Image (cartoon, rainbow, N blue to C red):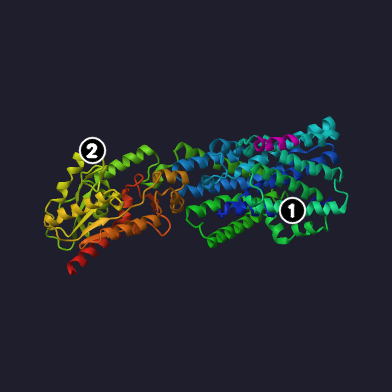
Amino acid sequence: MNNYRSELDGIRGISIIAVLFYHLDLNTFHFSNGYLGVDVFLVLSGYLISRNIIRELRDNGKLNLSTFFEKRTRRILPLLVTLTLFCQILFYFYLLPDQLIDLAKSSLAALTLTSNFYWVNEFSEYSAVGASFRPLLHTWSLSLEEQFYITAPFFYILAFKREKSSLLKVLILITIAGVSTNTLPLIFSWGGDLDFYLYPFRIWQFAIGAIAAYLECTKKDLLLNLKARLAATLTSLLILLATLFLGRLFLENEHLARLTVTLSSFLLIIASREGMLVTSLLKVKPLTYIGLFSYSIYVWHYPLFFLARIKEFFTTPSQKIVVVAITLLIATVSYFCLENVFRNREKIKKSTIYMSLAFGFIVSIALSMFIIINRGYPERFGQFHYTIDQMHNDQQRYWDENSYFTDIDWEDQKRLKVVVIGNSYALDIATAIKHEDHRAQVLFEGKTEHHCISITLPGSNEQADKCLDNIPLFKKDYKEYDVIVITDNHSFLDIGNTQAVDEILKNVSYLRTSGFQGPIVLVGFRPEWDKTPFEIALNYGALDEGVNIFATSFLTYSPEQIRELDENAKKVYNIEGLFYFELVDTICKIDHCPIIKDQKLLYSDSYHFSLAGAHYISKDLVDYLFKVAEQHKKN
């Protein structure tokens, strides 16, 4: 008897497309239920595995466990082992130490078929933003299916030995219990992660598929009436499509949506028959091909989408189309060259496959253990340190090492001579100029406290003496210098604070009275972050360009808001000889501000630059200083 039903591949095709849409981050709630495509896979697995076992037990009176597990091994494990090896090798070059350790541990969990247990403890929110940055998170469902494959044969063997006539009743009871568990959150407004990840809370979906298999094997037809069958198939297909692809427009509650797709899948399985319209639609070749490759697509899409994100190639629709196309291509190659080859019992003997898998397991486990033992190889990223304490030490070292500047060479007429006055913000600017020492020389004047407004205006009475101590910095003789740069916190951009504005203008007046008539540059607003960029990078999980887009939501002010503040400030400080350097245009792109470049963090905390950050702005800054110096000479 031919057991193949091509319309089931059509259902698989619909399900994997829904999963892809969900993970494409299309910024619409239309596809917010796409992850429930996995629930459809569970029902289909329950049906197909149960059908095969029931038929063998019915026809032979026993089940060949060796053959059964060999088939499941050939179907699942070669691709799973390849996936873990691929991820550990590739993402060694991108993942932060903590995340590389996380990948190693999740690889071990995937290989031991306990991935769902691992993720319910380590990262419970499947739909959270950070879920997209864990390349093996999707293996939770593979572990779930394998746990079903391991337990199902023993359940059926026991059922057939005891009272096989009661098998349907047991399956119905399991289903009712599972549905009841699934609806508890609806009744009591309770939500948990155990019912998402763990097998005992998902067994009812396999059981519903098993009921469909039992009805087919025992030739019990619940839909004898043709009209009822047509109505059931069409209605169930439409409801399934609406739930998966219309998201919250159709069903907003996760548990109700799960129940809906599960029951719709069950109805499609038991109602569809050869020659029916819905069956013909599900057998459309492109859809069945996608369904045929669905396992390979599912395995490869998640890490490939993650790779695209960290390479900053996952933002525009055209980029996502390219990534999907590459995923489908790799999945096709994987299906024909790996999945299909290992499933062929004539080409690859049982001993060969077990030896190959043993070797793959050993290598993958060894890689995982080396990663864990070596703490994720933090030395891969040079200046990037993977603990908060080390980050703070690095920041202090940056301040200590860059607080000293070489004496000015007054005989050198080619290099620009710059004075930078301010606090720790000014130290960043002075360090940036120092980096261009072949073009500019810099004197740093700064001993101010952070709590001073406009460097010399106390922010509180407690800071009055310390802030007033900075006034002499503006009364020195700087006549021999080419440019003076004033930098402090962004307080002078608070245009509504007239006292702060007056303080800046007073300091400019001090400089003029002391004899400096050259250009004076105010440095504009810089990006500030709600979290340290270090922590943002850790949340993202990789040190590559994709983190820059991810970091946008942690900006205190958007690039657009910063530019608006800069425009207001330029109007207020529109005085001859006073220039305004818009730092945001050097640091930020149109819609985001990077926190890393060339795998180096640009910030040492939420607002101060690292050495790499100072270097990042150095050329544009020194170019601007040369420009204003030339412009001032012409005037």
Query: Given the current orientation, which residue lies at the most extreme top position?
Result: 162
Depicted 518 relative to depicted 471: above or below: below
Which amino acid lies under the numbered mark 2 shown in the image of this protein?
Asn
Residue occupied by mark 1: 237
Q: Residues within 10 Å of mark 1 (few under 14, many from 20)?
A: many
Would you say 497 lies left or right of 219 here? Answer: left
User: Is 179 included in the stretch rendered in magenta?
Assistant: yes
Proximity of marks 1 and 2: CB atoms separated by less than 8 Å: no
Residue at horizontal 25 percent and vertical 39 percent from the top: 460
Q: Is residue 5 visible?
A: no
Secondary structure under tag 2 reads: helix
User: Is 178 included in the stretch rendered in magenta?
Assistant: yes
Which amino acid lies under the numbered mark 1 shown in the image of this protein?
Leu
Residue at horizontal 64 percent and vertical 57 percent from the top: 332
Q: Judge by depth and name the residue closer to the eye, 338 or 155.
A: 155
Residue occupied by mark 2: 461
Q: Which residues are magenta?
A: 176-187
Would you say 229 lies left or right of 533 here? Answer: right
Residue at horizontal 64 percent and vertical 34 percent from the top: 188
The picture quadrant where one finds residue 416 is bottom left
| Residue 302 location (% of width, % of height) | 57, 50
Q: Nearer the viewer, mark 1 or mark 2?
A: 2
| Residue 168 location (% of width, % of height) | 82, 37
| Residue 356 location (% of width, % of height) | 62, 45
Q: From the image, which quarter does the C terminus lie in?
A: bottom left
The picture quadrant where one finds residue 560 is bottom left
Secondary structure under tag 1 reads: helix
| Residue 383 location (% of width, % of height) | 35, 46
